[in-house]
């Protein structure tokens, strides 16, 4: 059976997923309907899909992807009536399944990241009650096609998952900014520092993915005794680099818990 997939909200993340699935042929434009607040028609035209009102979206879709900001979830989702045979995929940060208000529809909760836009995303997912193994496999394949997906066993793990994959790209963008700034200040040409810094991060990430070795071992291999990397690593330690990252991820996780309890 071919699913009709409805994107309820189709902004940054909705478009990253939609664009990825259309270009890797996991979805065809005829299968997709979208709705957003004011940009629906423009977005639909861009992707060659249909823009519909929210009630039509809910009535025609087998699978509904909730991709609005969490603070609008109550206003947008609660007035809608879902059916038991429908599957809802939520990508909303910090919104537990029991607060989505989509019963009796069944829910797969996910936390993708912006890398999905280019097929290099990472997603964590949790299947709520009643989701079949066939549905799990199909949704798993969809997200796997945009990078990688890991299933969580417990919905509570979403806080840590969000801190790692959802917010993670921003930590790396911040590191890239600092690396490029330092290289610029040290005299490298502005035209090349961004590219060099990004390619360096890409290479390190690929090595970490492909080598199966512990990052500590990979780090050691770059750091010859008495060399430049050792000098740099000792400054990073002095400034508490690892502790700062752990603290940042704990803050993201804590914020996710606050959002989950309805704190704004
Ligand atoms: N951005 C990320 O890196 C990321 C990563 C993982 C998960 N997420 C999650 O993805 C969700 C969307 O985030 P985003 O960054 O894509 O936000 P966004 O760019 O602001 O997109 C939100 C979408 O919701 C639509 N919308 C707002 N009010 C609506 C209404 N009343 N009825 C129908 N549609 C409405 C907006 O329509 P208009 O465009 O017409 O205003 C827009 O299409 C969030 O829940 C977030 O937690 C985001």
Image: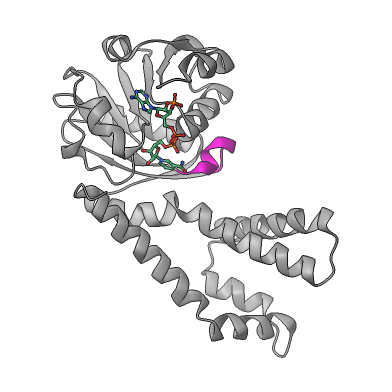
Question: Residue 205 falls in which quadrant of the image?
Answer: bottom right
Whether residue 34 can be seen here: yes
> Residue 153's x, y, as percent?
24, 49
Residue 51 part of the magenta-drawn span: no
Tell me the chief SS of the magenta region.
Answer: helix
Whether residue 153 can be seen here: no
- Tell whether 104 sits left or right of 248: left
> Residue 42's x, y, as percent?
54, 16
Q: Is residue 58 above or below residue 261?
A: above
Q: Is residue 40 above or below residue 65?
A: above
Q: Residue at x 31, y 9 (%)?
A: 56
Magenta stretch: give its range.
113-120
View quadrant of ligand 1: top left
Residue 114 part of the magenta-drawn span: yes
Q: Is residue 90 above or below residue 26?
A: below
> Residue 137's x, y, as percent?
34, 32
In which quadrant will I find the N terminus? top left
- Tell whether 102 sits left or right of 35: left
Q: Is residue 17 above or below residue 260?
A: above
């Amino acid at each position: 059976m071919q699913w009709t997939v409805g994107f309820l909200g189709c902004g940054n993340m909705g478009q990253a997923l939609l664009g990825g699935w259309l270009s890797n042929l996991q979805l065809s434009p005829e299968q997709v309907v979208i709705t957003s607040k004011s940009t629906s028609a423009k977005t639909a035209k861009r992707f060659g899909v249909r823009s519909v009102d929210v009630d039509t979206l809910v009535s025609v879709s087998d699978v509904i992807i909730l991709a609005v900001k969490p603070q609008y979830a109550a206003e947008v989702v609660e007035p809608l009536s879902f059916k038991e045979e429908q599957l809802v995929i939520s990508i909303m940060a910090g919104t537990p399944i029991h607060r989505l208000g989509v019963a009796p529809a069944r829910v797969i909760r996910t936390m993708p990241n912006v890398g999905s836009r280019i097929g290099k995303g990472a997603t964590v997912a949790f299947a709520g009650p009643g989701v079949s193994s066939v549905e799990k496999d199909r949704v798993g394949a969809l997200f796997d096609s945009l990078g990688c997906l890991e299933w969580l066993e417990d919905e509570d793990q979403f806080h840590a998952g969000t801190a790692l994959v959802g917010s993670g790209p921003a930590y790396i963008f911040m590191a890239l900014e600092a690396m490029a700034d330092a290289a610029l200040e040290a005299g490298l040409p502005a035209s090349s520092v961004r590219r060099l810094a990004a390619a360096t991060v890409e290479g390190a990430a690929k090595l970490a993915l492909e080598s199966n070795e512990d990052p500590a071992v990979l780090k050691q291999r770059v750091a010859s005794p008495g060399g430049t990397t050792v000098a740099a690593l000792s400054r990073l330690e002095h400034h508490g680099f690892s502790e700062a990252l752990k603290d940042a991820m704990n803050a993201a996780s804590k914020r996710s818990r606050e959002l989950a309890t309805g704190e704004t």
